[in-house]
Structures are given as structure tokens and as C-alpha cells.
Image (cartoon, helix red, strand yellow):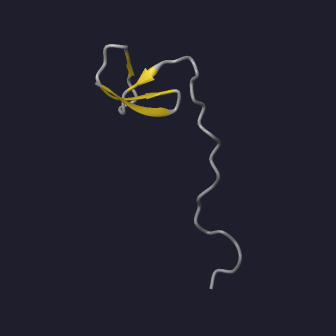
Amino acid sequence: MFGEEDLSGIEQLPAANHSADGAAYNVAGQRVTDGYRGIVIQNGKKTVRK
């Protein structure tokens, strides 16, 4: 019907640059301090701080 070409419009995206400086962010993308409790993204990994 459409042939062999890709008509989805989806292209390959470059890999995200994960900051290795140890900065932590909440799920809203806001930088948080060590005292923050909740879901934290640090070095590309999600963890829960209690």
C-alpha cells in the first residue's frame, strides 16, 4: 500500500546526556538537595529517598 519507505515520521534521537556530577532531580526536573524526600533521579537512575 505505502511501499518500503518509513512514513511514521519517527526518527532516531540522540542519547540523553546524563550529568555525572551527582546532582539530584525530582520527577518534575527540579534540582533537589540532600534533604529532599521522594522519588529522585540521580546519574540517570531513579531512587526513592525516605
Q: Position of residue 29 (x, y in %)?
A: 40, 29
**Residue drawn at (48%, 18%), measured in percent from left and top?**
23
Q: Position of residue 26 (x, y in %)?
A: 36, 28
Identify whether 2 is placed above or below 9: below
Compared across the picture, whether 22 is left or right of 7 comes to left
- Classify residue 8 by image quadrant: bottom right
- Classify residue 32 by image quadrant: top left
How many dots with numbers?
0
Identify whether 37 is placed above or below 46: above
- Classify residue 24 by image quadrant: top left
Q: Camera-side residue: 19 or 13?
A: 19
Judged from this view, the residue extending furthest toward the right is 4
Compared across the picture, whether 48 is left or right of 22 comes to left
Q: Position of residue 11 (x, y in %)?
A: 63, 55
Compared across the picture, whether 34 is left or right of 42 comes to left
**Residue drawn at (59%, 36%), measured in percent from left and top?**
16
Q: Position of residue 1 (x, y in %)?
A: 62, 86
Q: Quadrant of the C terminus?
A: top left
**Residue drawn at (52%, 32%), measured in percent from left and top?**
44
Q: Camera-side residue: 20 or 2?
A: 20
